[in-house]
Image (cartoon, rainbow, N blue to C red):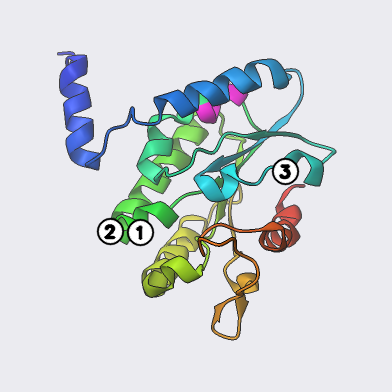
Amino acid sequence: MRVPLLVFLFLFLIGNAQDPFRFQGEVDAISKKYGTLWDSSKETIVFTGSSSIRMWDDLQQRFPGQQIVNSAFGGSQASDLLAYSNELILHFNPKKVFLYEGDNDLANKKRVKLILADLQKIIDTIKHGNRSTHIVLIAAKPSPARWHLRHKYKRLNRGMEKLTQDNTTVEFANIWDVMLVGRKPMPDIFIADGLHMNTKGYDLWYAVLKNYIN
C-alpha cells in the first residue's frame, strides 16, 4: 500500500522536528546558478553542508584544476541536507563530496546519536547513487560562539571518524585541531559573530582539505 504524500511529509516533520521545505528558495537558487555554470561533461567535486561551506566563496580559485560545486545552504542541519540530497549532491554525479554538517544540529540541541544517524543516511544515499563516489566528512569546527558545546562537538567528531572506519571511500578530515591555539579556538580566524570564519580560517581549512582532493 502506498503511503499518501501528505502522510509521508507529516511523518518526516515529526521525526525531524523541522520543516524540510524551509530552504526551498535557497536550494532553487543554487540549482539555477549551477544550471549555467556546471559542465556535466567534466568530473565534479561537491562541497556542501551549512554556512561554513556556503561562505567559502573562493573554493573554485583554491582548486583551479577541479570543477567545484558549492551547494551549501546557511542554517542547514544534516536532516535538511538529507532531504535535498538529490538536488544538491546526486544531480552533479560527483566523484567526491566534502560534507560539513552537525554544527547547527548541536546548536539546536540535537543529540549526537541522531546527527550521526542522519549523516549515515546521507552517506548511504550518495553510495546508492554511485558507489564509487568518495566522501569526506569535515569535522565540526571549534568556535568562540559555541565553545560551551565543545564536549558535544568532540563526541560528534569522534562519532564521525568512526563512521569512516572500514570504508576506503569515506574519510574524516580533522580541521578541529588546526583551529586551536592552546586549548581554545584561535581568536583571529573568525568574523565578528565568533562563529563564521575569515580568510585566515579558510586558509587553515584549505591546508587540511587539499590533501583529500586527489
In this view, the residue in front, 161 or 147, is: 147
Which residue corresponds to the image point at 56% horizontal and 55% vertical from the top-left? 138
Q: In the image, which residues are magenta?
A: 88-92
Residue 60 percent across, percent down from the top left: 76, 39
Q: Is residue 24 visible?
A: yes
Residue extending farthest to the front is: 192
Q: Is residue 86 visible?
A: no
Residue extending farthest to the bottom is: 182
At label 1, the amino acid type is: Leu
At label 3, the amino acid type is: Leu
In this view, the residue in front, 126 or 206, is: 206
Question: Could you tell me if the residues under marks 2 and 1 are in contact, i.e. CB atoms within 8 Å?
Answer: yes
At label 2, the amino acid type is: Lys
Question: Could you tell me if the residues under marks 2 and 3 are in contact, i.e. CB atoms within 8 Å?
Answer: no
Question: How far is the residue under mark 2 from the one under mark 1?
Answer: 5 Å
Depicted 145 relative to depicted 48: above or below: below
The residue tagged with tag 3: helix, strand or loop? helix
Residue 44 percent across, percent down from the top left: 70, 31
Nearest to N terminus: mark 2 or mark 3: 3
> In the image, which disc is placed on residue 70?
none
Question: How far is the residue under mark 3 from the one under mark 1?
Answer: 26 Å
Instruction: Say which residue label 2 marks.
Output: 109
Crowding at mark 1 (Cα within 10 Å: few <14, some 14-19, many 20+): many
Q: Main secondary structure of the magenta part?
A: helix
Instruction: Say which residue label 1 marks.
Output: 106
Instruction: Say which residue label 3 marks.
Output: 59
Depicted 3 relative to depicted 64: above or below: above
Residue 160 percent across, percent down from the top left: 46, 59
Magenta-span inclusion, residue 146: no
Question: How far is the residue under mark 2 from the one under mark 3?
Answer: 30 Å
Which residue corresponds to the image point at 53% horizontal and 56% vertical from the top-left? 166
